[in-house]
Amino acid sequence: MVSHKGVDYTKILKRYDVEAQNETTPESVAKKMLPSDPTLKKVAETVLYMKFKDVGPAVTEALKTVKPLSVINDGLVVGMECVAKLYAEHIYYLPEIMMAAKTMEIGIAIAEKQIPGGRETKGLVVMHAAEGDPHDIGKNIAAVMMRSSGYSVIDMGKDVAVTDVVAEVVKSKPMLITGTALMTTTMTAFPHAAEQLRGKGINTPFMAAGGAVNRDFAESFDLGIYSEKAPQTPPIADKIKAGYDWRKIREEWDNIVGGA
Ligand code: B12
């Protein structure tokens, strides 16, 4: 007969990290990650707790004292970072993520309206999320930043077929193309698209971004350049406008994104 005498169960539980998992709650993550500014904290909380009816009033209130880009980056995005942490810890699951993402989208739409636009455009950018990839929140934030920095954006949306990206670039001749991939299964769409563009004699820089890609990958194919965070895109675009090609952007990348 098997004897359990002498087995220390607390050690077994520790080994499988059950205790650690149980300690993580939305409240504990909030305590560690939410901004200290009470107005921004309130905004971030609406995303963290998926309060899509409260996000409008919270963002509108914040916009009275905080700049729209800061409401997005230091409020809404921080709330989503908490959600991503809870998802990674198996505290939140897909339904929570979808509701949090929806809440964030409502907030971004309100804040975006307060960003001054309509000035003379610095250039045209074609943005998309990779074929097969439904993750578009980071792209949407980068698009807001590009518009607020004076660029025109054709936002092709998410899960955009490589052939459609190539056709749009041929048609609208942008100064920069951006692609977002959060899934390792979709990021190969970028070299595929870039190769087709090169075949047509197009040399427009192709920015690969999103959690699935890194600088090594982005620079592993012709035309490819990298951006790690949405705020890095406008300074890179400014250099392209100043005449830098994709090779020069790679050489100067550290200096260009320095503070961004
Ligand atoms: C929200 C989310 C979703 C939402 C997406 C909603 C939406 N409209 O985007 C929904 C629920 C739809 C979803 C679905 C799925 N998801 Co999901 N999802 C996430 C989650 C939790 C957060 C992503 C997010 O929006 N973060 C907030 C934004 C602000 O951050 P970000 O995108 O990283 O953007 C920053 C940078 O990357 C960068 N950036 C991003 N894009 C761009 C673009 C430009 C131009 C620039 C310059 C910068 C830039 O700037 C931003 C910050 O400044 C991540 C986990 C994670 N840790 O990332 C998983 C994650 C991306 N999902 C994952 C998976 C697997 C899935 C599913 C396949 C799950 C499933 N089993 O069904 C499905 C997809 C099914 C399908 N094929 O259709 C995996 C991907 C794993 C991998 N490496 O391949 C992740 C990493 C979770 C995990 N750890 O397993 N998901």
Image (cartoon, grey):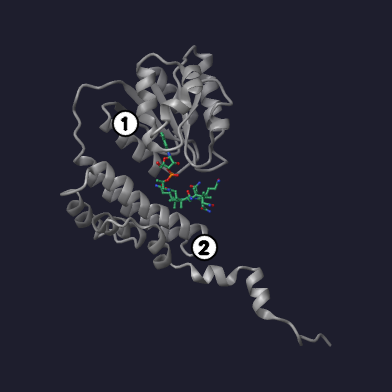
Q: Which amino acid, mark 2? A: His
Q: Is residue 143 above or below residue 251?
A: below
Residue projecting furthest to the right = 1
**Mark 1 falls on what kind of element?**
helix
Q: Is residue 20 above or below residue 126?
A: below
Q: Which amino acid, mark 1? A: Met
Residue at screen point 39% across, 37% down? 230
Q: Which residue is mark 2?
A: 90
Residue at screen point 36% across, 59% down? 48
**Mark 2 falls on what kind of element?**
loop
Asked if residue 157 shows in the view, the reply is no
Q: Position of residue 209 (x, y in %)?
A: 47, 35
Residue at screen point 22% across, 56% down? 58
In the foreground, 134 or 247:
247
Q: Which residue is mark 1?
A: 146
The numbered mark at residue 223 is none
**Quarter of the C terminus within the rendering:** top left
Q: Position of residue 70 (x, y in %)?
A: 28, 44
Q: Is residue 191 above or below residue 228?
A: above
Q: Position of residue 74 (x, y in %)?
A: 32, 48
